[in-house]
Image: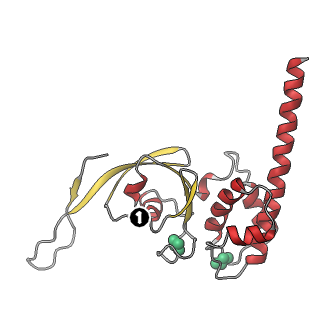
């Protein structure tokens, strides 16, 4: 999107003029819903989500791409939203923790497994851990604990809840495989019924 706006700065020090702030319109598709917002070119994706859209599920911790707390999916791939500019996400699909549960509120298997395994203390890293695990399990549906350790290495937990996190990811993988098998069997039964 190309139209650029100038927003006057509210504060002025003495007689020194403060240059206006440039903003640009962008469209973010977040959890399937399109949002058009006006951002400064320096606005990060995490700030666009939290400040412009009020979606505070994504956490900002290090702000340097080092801890993984701000992990979201951008076009299906894990990114740390604190080091991606919002303007780089114009027209792209963003998935956040707010979009994981079913519309009726049923938690995603990973969310349920984190609760079952008490895989958090302060919870600040948790949305990032879960979003990271969503992408990890998509690519590794039957992971070993060592694979989980390596695949989730970019997500730090200052409370050191790592054992619970790994158990939760392994458990969710099992649940998701079971539900895929069930729905696959149901589809096969349905197909067989339609053919008979
Ligand atoms: S807050 Fe983004 S990686 Fe730490
Ligand atoms: S639960 Fe506190 S940082 Fe992970």
Left or right? Give the position of 146 relative to 17: right
Disc 1 secondary structure class: loop
Furthest residue to the right? 196
Q: Quadrant of residue 113?
A: bottom right
Of residues 150 and 80, the one nearer the viewer is 150
Of residues 140 and 75, the one nearer the viewer is 140
Left or right? Give the position of 33 relative to 132: left
The quarter in which the C terminus is drawn is top right
Q: Is residue 45 visible?
A: yes
Of residues 93 and 148, the one nearer the viewer is 148
Furthest residue to the left? 15
For image coordinates 44% across by 63% down, the residue present is: 84
Please tell me in which quarter of the rendered image ligand 2 is found. Answer: bottom right
Q: Residues within 10 Å of mark 1 (few under 14, many from 20)?
A: many
Q: Is residue 90 above or below residue 59?
A: above
Q: Is residue 143 above or below residue 13?
A: above
Image coordinates for residue 122, horizontal then vertical, percent: 66, 77
Image coordinates for residue 3, horizontal then vertical, percent: 25, 47
Q: Which residue is mark 1?
A: 44
Q: Is residue 60 visible?
A: no
For image coordinates 64% across by 82% down, the residue present is: 158
Q: Quadrant of residue 150?
A: bottom right
Left or right? Give the position of 152 relative to 57: right
The quarter in which the N terminus is drawn is top left
For image coordinates 67% across by 69% down, the residue present is: 152
């Amino acid at each position: 999107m190309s139209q650029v706006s100038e927003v006057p700065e509210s504060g002025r020090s003495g007689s020194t003029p403060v240059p206006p702030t440039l903003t640009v319109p962008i469209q973010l598709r977040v959890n399937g819903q399109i949002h058009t917002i006006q951002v400064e070119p320096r606005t990060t994706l995490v700030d666009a989500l939290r400040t412009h859209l009020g979606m505070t599920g994504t956490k900002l911790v290090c702000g340097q791409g080092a801890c993984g707390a701000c992990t979201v999916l951008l076009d299906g791939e894990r990114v740390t939203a604190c080091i991606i500019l919002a303007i780089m996400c114009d027209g792209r699909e963003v998935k956040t923790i707010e979009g994981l549960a079913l519309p009726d509120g049923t938690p995603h298997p990973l969310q349920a497994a984190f609760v079952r395994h008490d895989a958090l203390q302060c919870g600040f890293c948790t949305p990032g851990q879960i979003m990271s695990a969503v992408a990890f399990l998509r690519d590794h549906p039957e992971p070993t604990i060592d694979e989980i350790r390596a695949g989730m290495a970019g997500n730090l937990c200052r409370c050191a809840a790592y054992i619970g996190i790994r158990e939760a990811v392994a458990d969710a993988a099992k649940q998701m495989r079971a539900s895929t098998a069930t729905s696959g069997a149901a589809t096969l039964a349905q197909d067989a019924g339609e053919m008979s």
